[in-house]
Amino acid sequence: MVARLGEWLNERVGWRRVWEAIFLRKVPKLNWLYTLGSATLFVAVNQIVTGILLTIYYVPTPDHAYDSVRYITTEVPAGWLIRGLHHWGASAMVILAALHMLRVILYGSYKYPREVTWVSGVLLLLVVVGFGFTGYLLPWDQKAFWATTVGTRIAGVAPLIGDSILRVMRGGAELSAVTLARFFGVHVWVLPAVFLLLLFVHLYLVIRLGISAVPHHKE
Amino acid sequence: MNEDKSVDRRGFMSIVTWAIGGLITAAMGIPGVAYVLGPALQNAQVEQWIRLGSTSKVELGTPTLFKAKVQRKTGWVTAEDELAVFVRSDNGRDFIAMSNICTHLGCRVRWIAERQQFLSPCHNGVFDRDGNVVSGPPPRPLDRYAVKVEDGQIHILGG
């Protein structure tokens, strides 16, 4: 029954070829370091799912942000788990992406013909850092407030345009309700859109070009 | 290759992969559902006696509207809400208290003195002086509150 339905769909959609291209593609003899990219992808999915769930209760305004986060953590069933997964997943994401990048550097996997894969990966890492920076403000507690005060100040010391960058980031001279709202908007709309686009390019190229083998001693 | 039905290495790995995937999905999915549904399944406010006002304000035979402030906690917000209740007494000793919320879709009813009826303006729901449905779409009479009188003050049990 299921097999016939799959066949019916495949005849019209051709999903089997897509499935084979993604999961049954040929790969050289690899080691466990090659799982770091998939591990990063796994955590990214975790961040997307838990992040969407958090927005069901979180409100990005100064009078509600802290209370709504506390409500999620202490009163919503499994809220502590969803928030915890998102919180720790954020750190795991940065660490795994960095380790993944190290593997690519050490094995020379960024070389021809994989330069575009590499560039998209570097951009993805920047987006991940952007996620971390904007997400850190959202709980709107003391640590969040002062970390973002410092973070935007650091951007402010850039020569000539520093003050303009600081004002654009904060939405004014001071850290305010405007800052919280724009950080939220960037965190849940702008960055996810950019992230998914880059991720699509990255994975398409990984599948199209195949994975580089572990460098050999000879030849 | 194998003629018998025993699971080969590739098949075994496939089963294990799907099983782990299913386990992770369940571990994420079940808390996710609980998380979304949680507040919807929580019980409403705790009921308590709310003081409406003096019995002397009730005109005999006429439903009199009382308003009381109640603290309501919804999610992380505690806000002051206004409760409006019609109180009627025919003899000055026995009181009935009715909600002013129409049982059809929640509009507020008002007392039309010349017709001796409650009218809900939204869909022309009409209730008699006891709160029973006279005409229109309301499915049941106006909700009643338990009433007690202490020191000449009317209290209702609500939340």
Image (tube, rainbow, N blue to C red):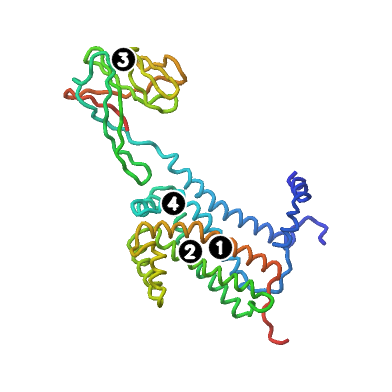
Residue A103 x/y as whole percent:
59, 76
User: Label 2 to label 3, Cα distance in Å?
Assistant: 63 Å
User: Label 4 to label 3, Cα distance in Å?
Assistant: 52 Å
Q: Amino acid at mark 3?
A: Ala
Q: Amino acid at mark 1?
A: Phe
Residue in the foreground of this view, choosing between B30 and B72: B72
Which quadrant holds residue A171?
bottom left
User: Label 3 to label 1, Cα distance in Å?
Assistant: 65 Å
Q: Quadrant of the C terminus of chain A?
A: bottom right
Residue pictured at 34% horizontal, 22% vertical: B110
Sooner in the amino-acid sequence: mark 1 or mark 4: 4
User: Label 1 to label 4, Cα distance in Å?
Assistant: 25 Å
Residue position for label 1: A195
Chain for mark 1? A
User: Label 1 to label 2, Cα distance in Å?
Assistant: 10 Å
Q: Is residue B124 left or right of residue A214?
A: left
Residue B147 x/y as whole percent:
27, 23
Residue in the foreground of this view, choosing between B30 and A58: A58
Chain for mark 3? B
